[in-house]
Image: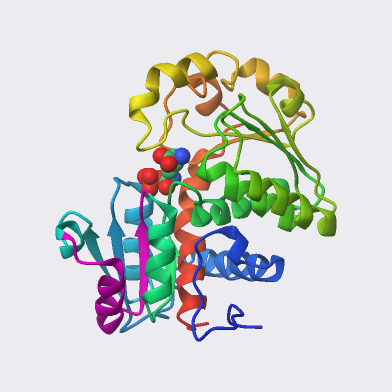
Amino acid sequence: MKTLKTSLSKKDVLSIADLSANEINLILKVACRLKKEWKSGRGRQLLRGKTLGMIFQKPSTRTRVSFEVGMSQLGGDAVYLSANDIQLSRGETIEDTAKTLSLYLDCIMARVYDHTEVQKLATYASVPVINGLSDAFHPCQILADLMTIQEHKKKLKGLQLAWLGDGDNVCNDLMLGCAKTGISMTAACPKGYEPLEEVVMLAKQEGKKTGSDIVITEDPAAAAKDADVVVTDTFISIGKEGERATREAMFLPKYQVSSETMKLAKKGAIFMHCLPAKRGQEVTSEVIDGTSSVVWSEAENRLHVQKALLCLLMKAV
Ligand code: CP
Ligand code: NVA
């Protein structure tokens, strides 16, 4: 299979839920190949003549730059569209925006607040749509995370992953990614900050097929115990700044990943964070800047998995 399967005339990737286990494996395989080729100076212009449009309602460092550079490395172009600068900001509908952009672009990546907006964009666009982060999901991040885990642990199936903190957009898709690839995941989140209920249900169902055990707890020590991978994210996602005081009171210090947390994990456990990170909040400097941290591989792999995804969606490999 050389393209991502779809029953429609195009494929959208709005969540890890949109990808089968085979498709995830295919993306990781192509990503490894593209990474090797690029690093050895044998990069191919697989997307020459193709243009990606990138709609951003929220700020970004990694997503914007890795998509833009990824398109450039593949010989294509990327157009940055700040949501404030296009007619969407003056009330043009998502439907009309999607139809118009599909006339010029070969693929659209969008970072939005409300997940239903990227869903609507995908419904009306005739080109593939990729979610570059919504309030509910962050599929590109999780593809990079799986690639990073595979590189550092030499496998996915059978590993134990601990999530500490907010059951946010990254946690939702990570849970699906773990379930589909046979990684067991325990998420320790305060009450009221768990991942989405329907996601947990879906992950548990998927996990039954792969042997992945999905557990939600309030106990960070139970999650970290014997983990191969320890993951966290900001306690204050974009758009939640108004909840800072409440969130800090809920999460700190109990859910912070510290050296004590890492001592509970398996020997040789790795620490991951999608970034941006707040040292002294969700993670201590000692951990994120220490020897168990693989956050820079994780950030780099955004580039490689997204290049693979773009090639597969635009049927260039
Ligand atoms: N991890 C991630 O998506 O980073 P940015 O918000 O900088 O794009
Ligand atoms: N959960 C974070 C992820 C940032 C990449 C947020 O939504 O801000």
Tell me: 42 left or right of 59: right
Residue 264 to residue 194: above or below: above
Residue drawn 43% across the image and 51% down it: 134
The colouring scheme, among rainbow, by chain, secondary structure or one colour, is rainbow
Residue 218: where, in percent of width, then height?
68, 24
For the question of whether residue 109 can be seen, the reply is: yes
> Which span of residues is magenta-colored?
91-113
Residue 243 is situated, as x and y percent measured from the top left of the image, at: 39, 24
Q: Is residue 103 magenta?
A: yes
Queried whether the magenta region covers residue 109, the answer comes back as yes
In the rendered view, would you say 223 is above or below 296? above
Is 121 positioned to the left or the right of 298 in the image? Answer: left
Q: Can see residue 150?
A: no
Residue 244 lies left or right of residue 228; in this view the side is left
At a point 32% along the width and 47% down the height, the residue shown is 60
Q: Where does residue 307 sit, x and y in percent of width and height? A: 46, 67
Q: Position of residue 309 (x, y in %)?
A: 50, 69
Residue depicted at 72% across the width and 49% down the height: 201
Which image quadrant: the N terminus? bottom right
Residue 195, picture quadrant:
top right
Give the residue at x 33% y 46%. Answer: 61
Q: Say which quarter of the image contains residue 259.
A: top right
